[in-house]
Amino acid sequence: MRSVSRRSLLRGGALGVAAATVAGCAAGRPEPSHPPAAEPPDPEIMLIRQLIAGKERTIALYSSAGSGKLLPFRQRHEAHLAELRRRLPRETVPASPSPSSSPSGTPTTTPREPVSVRSLRDLERESAALRPRQLDGVSPALAQLIASIGACEAAHALALSRPL
Amino acid sequence: MRATARAAARGAARGQDLTTALAAEHAAVYAYGVIGARTTGSLRVTATAAFNAHRARRDQLRALITAGGGVPVEPDAAYRLPVTPSTPAQAVELATLVERGVTAAYLELTASSDASVRRMAALAMQECVTRSYGLRPEIEAFPGMPTPAPAPSSSGSPAPPS
């Protein structure tokens, strides 16, 4: 047992020396002309960012519509936005404030022209239709969140097709 | 062997989620049968349409379970309803409770490892929520999710799920 252990140690030491030699050779080479490739982006993080951008646009459209009756709709989108931002790793959360937290309550991306209820309804309908296709390959927890958001958007689309 | 065991466990979990959704659809079909029998006019028309929609989803879930080698759960002979629909208001109350319960069951299914099952469950959730809105025009920010936690800020926005 003891001799095996010594042999192992010796072998390990020899390998260690060999590894150090290889590393030393590598360190002695000139630096490559291009920087090492960056880590590929996490598809789930990319999707969350995409969803966040979509929610910010939707909230901006609701803000520009200017009807108090649409406020609950906007607030639900803001809740979606907050939850999506919460799913991002801390270091990747965008520094921009949420639209509702700006002093005027109006996001900087607010469209100049007021939007119609019909266009909001169409937007909600398109968003709801997109959600089931966004569930492929994402974590179970994110799939559930997206599905729930889609259900809310489907209800929005129906509500906006009726007199407010 | 470990990979096989993991695959079997995933299959079993998926089967359990499908069974939960099927059980919810069985209950919905029963409840809408009662609602249809105890209502008249447009409410009965709405209840009949909902009955047919839930029956179609029930059959779809049965087929999925059978195709996966499982045995679909059978409906109970009767269900204890949370509300006895003696008035139109009570019928609406029961129907919205049913839709909420089925929505929650489908939310579980959207976490399935099968992409086609996820899509089907997400669409079924949207159907439940819009049916519910047709009966009572109320919208939750996160349908199917557990009762929301208190809002994280004082903006008055509906709170996200915990």
Image: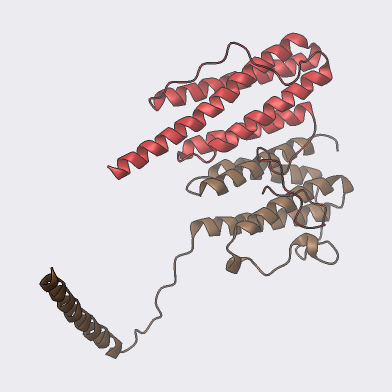
Chain colours: A brown, B red
Q: Residue at x 44, y 69 (%)?
A: A39
Please identify the residue farthest to the right as the structure is shown: A68
Please state the total of marks drawn on the protein image: 0
Give the x, y percent position of residue A60.
Answer: 76, 57
Along the line of sight, which residue is nearer the eye, A7 or A162? Answer: A7
| Residue B20 coordinates in the image, percent (x, y) | 54, 28
| Left or right of B92, for residue A12 | left
Quadrant of the snapshot with the N terminus of chain A: bottom left
Between B50 and B88, the residue placed more toward the observer is B88
Quarter assignment of residue B53:
top right
Residue A111 visible in the displayed image: no
Q: Residue at x 64, y 67 (%)?
A: A94
Q: Position of residue A118 (x, y in %)?
A: 78, 42
* Residue A158 visible (yes or no): yes
Q: Is residue A134 left or right of residue A53?
A: left
For the C terminus of chain A, the image quarter is top right
Q: x and y percent of residue A63 in the render?
A: 81, 55
* Left or right side of B66 for B160: right
Residue pushed farthest top?
A: B37
Q: Residue at x 73, y 66 (%)?
A: A97
**From what the image shows, is residue B19 above or below residue A148?**
above
| Residue at the limit of the structure toward the front, as seen here | A2
Quadrant in the rendering for residue A162: top right
Residue occupying image coordinates x 74% and y 53%: A78
> Quadrant of residue A7 in the image?
bottom left
Q: Nearer the viewer, residue A3 or B44?
A: A3
